[in-house]
Structures are given as structure tokens and as C-alpha cells.
Image (cartoon, grey):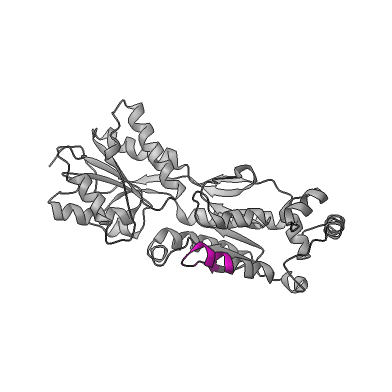
Amino acid sequence: MAVTIKDVAELAGVSPSTVSRTCKDHPSISLQTKEKVRLAMKKLGYEPNFQASSLASQTSRIIGIILPPSEKEIYENSFYLEAIRGIIQYCNEHQYINTVITGKNEEEILDVIRSAVKRGQADGFILLYSWEEDPVAAYLMEEGLLYVLVGKAYRNANQTVYVDNDNILAGREAAEYLINLGHRKIGCILPANGLLFAADRRAGYFLALTEHQIPICQDYCVEAALCSRDQGEPLRALLGREDRPTAVVVCDDILSLALETVCAGLGISIPEDLSVISFNNSVFARLSSPHLTSVDINAFQLGIAAASQMLRHIENPGLLATKVIVPHHIIERDSCQPPGER
């Protein structure tokens, strides 16, 4: 069995990220620690991936930004643009360079990451998404590579540096906003992409209904693709019911635009017939008609926080994995009102 960076870290009594930075002769690692790691590498016969370019890599100061695999969807979602803007602003201020990594599938992304690691062209990676059984996150963890996750860790939470919102609380507060307006038939529309934030927002929605003793109707909770010709079908099924909701929590502004199109086709008026509270407070929320009440998750601040944590762990490799929660708040606009008002 091949020796891994985790084996070296265990023998040397250090973290995998310390071994990684020792391989690049990073100046933040003390000479004593470097000698201890190199001795463990020699005993185990470990061959680092960085080849002969360690001296050049000292000045690389490059952070890889990993986007989810997609043919198209990610380029239409302003969340990623705002998060990247925050990352780049912070890195620019601290003389770090960014490179964006994505692909049409996980294997294509992994090929790019492996190539960057082999050449010593990245000091760390920021992963801009989180879902179950992600091979990209698994590779970064198994290889002991430094990475910061934007989102909740599905596995190895105590060993993962991550930055997130409290999405359960955000989903709960979005549903409570509608409940406080008087709504009792409240639906929930989720993106059909398996991202962990959506599951947490749904859990918060269920929690709010339960706390207010409102019966949960599982059929009121539907999933729709963010960017697909078929995204309207589950929305039409929900709104075509005789007992359709009078309000909905929508987990992404892009889905709210699709919802508006479906409502127009069915003769349903927002907010007179259906109140809508959405998430992200993106440009779509401000340009829709009516303007959307939306939960601002502060994507720009998420990016800044992720970059800040990355640089802290690069420059202080002995730090324990940290978790940062970025606050959210509701921006009230024109898409919600009490039921039955005209």
C-alpha cells in the first residue's frame, strides 16, 4: 500500500497540512519541525508530489477556488460570483493570487487539482460548495491538503475548516416571517442539486411549522432544478393543487424567478395570491417583479471569511480546524403580505 501524507503526519506527530508545507519548504514551518517531518518521510519512503520545484513554490502564494461541477448552472448563479469577489478582495490585500477550478464533472476537477498539487502550484484550496459523498472533498482530506469549505462539512467536521451560515436558523426565520403575516399553508421549494444548505433550510422550515403547531404537508415541499427546461413541472404541480399554499419559502432567488413565470401562466398573482420569501438577495431579487423579499446570506462576507481562514491556516499551520458562522438577515420588499389581502 502506498505511503500517504497522513502516514507521515502520524509518525511525525504533526498535522497533514504541516507535512504538505514542509514538502514545499514553507517558511512558516520551523526548522525543527521540518527536520522531524523529513525524518518521518525518509523512514517511510514517502515521495512528495511537489517534485523539484519547492524553492519556486515558496513565492507562489496561490489559492485555488473550487466551484461545483456543472456545464452551465454555476455561471448563472450570482452567489458564486459574490463569494469569489470576497475571496479575491481579501487575497489581493494580502498579496495572494487566486485561480478558479471547475469542470463538467468531479473527475475533471480532480485532474486539475492533482496537477496543481503535483507542480506545487497551490498553497491551499477554497471549496465553494458542500454536498454528501463529495469525491473532491474526500481527496483533499485524504491527501492532507489544506482546504476551507464554504458550507457545512458532511464528514470529518472536527478536522475541516469551514465557513457557513446557520441555514437551519435561516430556514426557520424565513418560515416564521410568513407565519407572522398570518399564513398557515406554507410550501418550501428547494434546488434539486443535493447541496447540504438546502437540507438545512428545509429542516428549519419544518421546525418553524412544528413550533407553531402547523401540520406539515410533505407534498408542499418540492425540488426543482435551478437551470432546466423541466424546472416548472414540480412548481406547476404544487400550485395546481386545490389546497395550494398561500405562501412559499424558496431556497434560491433563481428558483423564485422560475416560480414567477409559472404563477403568471396559472393566473396566480404575487403577493395577492401567493407570498414568496426567497434566499440570497441577489440581483434577481432586486430585478424581479414584484421585488423579492429575500434572506441575505452575505455571500461576499462568506468569501472574505473563507479567504481569511485560509491565510490564517497557511501562516499558522498548527491551528486547530476553525468554524465560522456568517450572519444572515431578511430584506423586506414587495413579495409578501397577509393572506387574503388585495
Nearest to the observer: residue 247 or residue 118: 118
Outermost residue toward the front in this view: 1
Residue 34 image offset from top left, x and y in percent: 83, 58
Q: Quadrant of the C terminus?
A: top left
Residue 9 image offset from top left, x and y in percent: 77, 52
Q: Is residue 301 above or below residue 59?
A: above
For the question of whether residue 73 can be seen, the reply is yes
On the rendered structure, is 66 left or right of 298? right
Residue 35 image offset from top left, x and y in percent: 87, 58
Q: Which residues are magenta?
A: 100-111
Q: Is residue 98 above or below residue 179?
A: below
Nearest to the observer: residue 319 or residue 74: 74
Residue shown at 22%/41% (left/top)?
A: 337
Q: Please identify the quarter of the rendering in which residue 76 is found.
A: bottom left
Q: Quadrant of the N terminus?
A: bottom right
On the rendered structure, is 321 left or right of 68? right
Specify whether residue 108 is painted magenta: yes
